[in-house]
Image (spheres, helix red, strand yellow):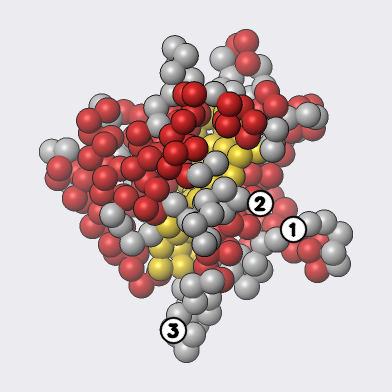
Amino acid sequence: MTASFVIYIDESGDEGFRFKDGSSEWFVLSAVITRKTEDLEVVKLVDRVRATLRKDPQYELHFRDLRHEQRLAYINEISQAHLRVVSILMHKPSIYEQEVFQQRYRLYFYAVRYLLERASWYCRDHPYDQDVHDGSAEIIFSNRAGMSYDELRQYLNLLKTQSAIGAKDIRIEWSVVKAEQIKAYPARARMGLQIADAVASSFYFSVQPRYGFVEGRYVSMLKPVVYSRKGQYRGYGLKFWPREIEGTILRESRYDFFRNDYGL
């Protein structure tokens, strides 16, 4: 049996806490979920975007390097694709015990936990072809310099053990997430990672102010592919952490698009 899904994961922002020295306020981790049998469509999507933007067929798409109008064309293609996206948006200044999350990999691993919880729920609730596929997911990370993916696998196995004995409120669907199916590639090697980069960057631009402004148009366009359950996006395809930051999102007018488009 083979995996039923592929989950592509990339990030935007940084994990630093030295805000006066240039650390981003936000760290965003995003997943793009596709069915394994439809993974070729991801390649075709990237090819279409390259053609639209008149880029070389081998050009590696980096969302940050594109002009605004090029980004719109890219996001428009993603918004019509047969895939789902999940994003975890972490506001680092609002974290109560910042010193804890400055430890090696701590913030990143915590974001991975939240992301895989939600991605695994989606996969669990959309099974198919059980005679051929086992309902699990191939989990593909964009390769990070200096990252130990063995440590990430160990972390997930620890979470699985803790979940089994009820030690913590861990809600990963373990029939979907298997540590041995975690892999890491450069974005040029797997087209889905380039889409995950676009999604993560879109959500990052929607929350990280530049010159006092945020850019919400990309996120509004992505709504058709953001994971929801019974019309509820918050807590599924869209999670803000820590919870206290939701008050800021609800209050400030520059985040109106989250309230209007996602019902926050």
Picture disc at residue 35: none
Q: How many marks?
A: 3
- Which residue ends up furthest to the bottom in the rendered image? 131
The crowding category of the residue bearing disc 3, from other C-alpha atoms within 10 Å (few below 14, some 14 to 19, many at least 20), is few
Cα distance in 3D space between marks 3 and 2: 27 Å
**Contact (Cβ within 8 Å) of mark 1 with mark 2:** yes
Please tell me whether mark 3 sits on a helix, a strand or a loop.
Answer: loop
Provide residue 179's location: percent of width, then percent of height: 63, 62
Can residue 177 be seen at all in this image of the molecule? yes
Q: Residue at x 45, y 63 (%)?
A: 6
Please tell me whether mark 2 sits on a helix, a strand or a loop.
Answer: helix
| In-front residue for pair 154/92 | 92
Q: Which residue is mark 1?
A: 170
Whether residue 190 is situated above or below residue 64 in the rendered picture: below
**Contact (Cβ within 8 Å) of mark 1 with mark 3:** no
Please tell me whether mark 1 sits on a helix, a strand or a loop.
Answer: loop
Q: Which residue is mark 2?
A: 113
Provide residue 91's location: percent of width, then percent of height: 63, 30
| In-front residue for pair 11/26 | 26
Provide residue 65's location: percent of width, then percent of height: 31, 28
Cα distance in 3D space between marks 1 and 3: 28 Å
Task: Name the amino acid, label 1.
Answer: Ile
Task: Name the amino acid, label 3.
Answer: Asp
**Contact (Cβ within 8 Å) of mark 3 with mark 2:** no
**Sooner in the amino-acid sequence: mark 1 or mark 3:** 3
Task: Name the amino acid, label 2.
Answer: Arg
Q: Residue at x 82, y 61 (%)?
A: 162
- Image quadrant holding the C terminus, namely top right
The crowding category of the residue bearing disc 2, from other C-alpha atoms within 10 Å (few below 14, some 14 to 19, many at least 20), is some
Q: Which residue is mark 3?
A: 129
